[in-house]
Image (cartoon, grey):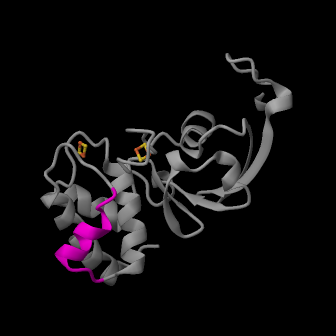
Amino acid sequence: MVYEETFEDGAGLEDLVEVQFTLNGRKRKVSVEPRELLATVLRDRLGMTGTHIGCDTTNCGSCTVIQDGQSVKSCTVFAIQADGSDIITVEGIGNVTELHPIQEAFQEKHGLQCGFCTAGMIMQSYWFLKENPDPSESEIRWGISGNICRCTGYQNIVDAVRLAADKMKTKGGS
Ligand code: FES
Ligand code: FES
């Protein structure tokens, strides 16, 4: 039971704050410490392990999620700041049997190698393509410039985002 949880550092019931938000279309309620980051709450309390933590210092973008229509680095948001908001993680945009067009494009263009950055890249692209549905290569490079990939050299990711834009024009994808 979340309400009875006591943490190793001695935080207990009196330190917890109840937070409610919509996560991938479902209302969720969770008790958190005021110091807890949205990224860790999504992963450790709510099972959304697609959201990765690569740096914890707002550099890598692997923790990117959508909060109220904006892409945010969830390691830079306290969970209590998510109260009342609408959160979308990579688990909320597609699944194994029905990939989102951005996920399809990453697969088809080999836009990943180890995959650590991929959920963040996809969520950043998800936001970016809503802002700019027909981006040039340089605009795509700007759009993902807050996300670091240590494997691909970026070209395949850029190609994937461009393909995703084409797919979303014909197939849609919200
Ligand atoms: Fe959030 Fe790196 S873990 S930016
Ligand atoms: Fe490995 Fe991007 S695919 S960090």
Q: Residue 148: image x %, image y %?
A: 28, 50
Q: Is residue 140 magenta?
A: yes
**76 over 67 or under it: above or below:** above
For residue 99, say whether it is visible.
Answer: no
Q: Residue 115: image x %, image y %?
A: 28, 43
For residue 69, say whether it is visible.
Answer: yes
Rendered image quadrant of residue 131: bottom left
Would residue 15 appear left or right of 129 to someone viewing this image? right
What residue is drawn where x is 64% and y is 38%? Answer: 36
Q: Is residue 148 magenta?
A: no
Quadrant of the rendered image holding ligand 1 = top left
Would residue 156 appear left or right of 118 to someone viewing this image? left
What residue is drawn where x is 23% and y is 55%? Answer: 107
Q: Residue 7: image x %, image y %?
A: 70, 20
What residue is drawn where x is 26% and y is 80%? Answer: 135
Instruction: Name, please, the residue furthest toward the right.
Output: 14
**130 over 123 or under it: above or below:** below
Which of the pair 11/62 is nearer the observer? Answer: 11
Report the number of discs.
0
Magenta highlight range: 134-146
**137 over 91 or under it: above or below:** below
Which of the pair 148/52 is nearer the observer? Answer: 148
Q: Residue 6: image x %, image y %?
A: 76, 21
**8 over 139 or under it: above or below:** above
Rendered image quadrant of residue 57: top left
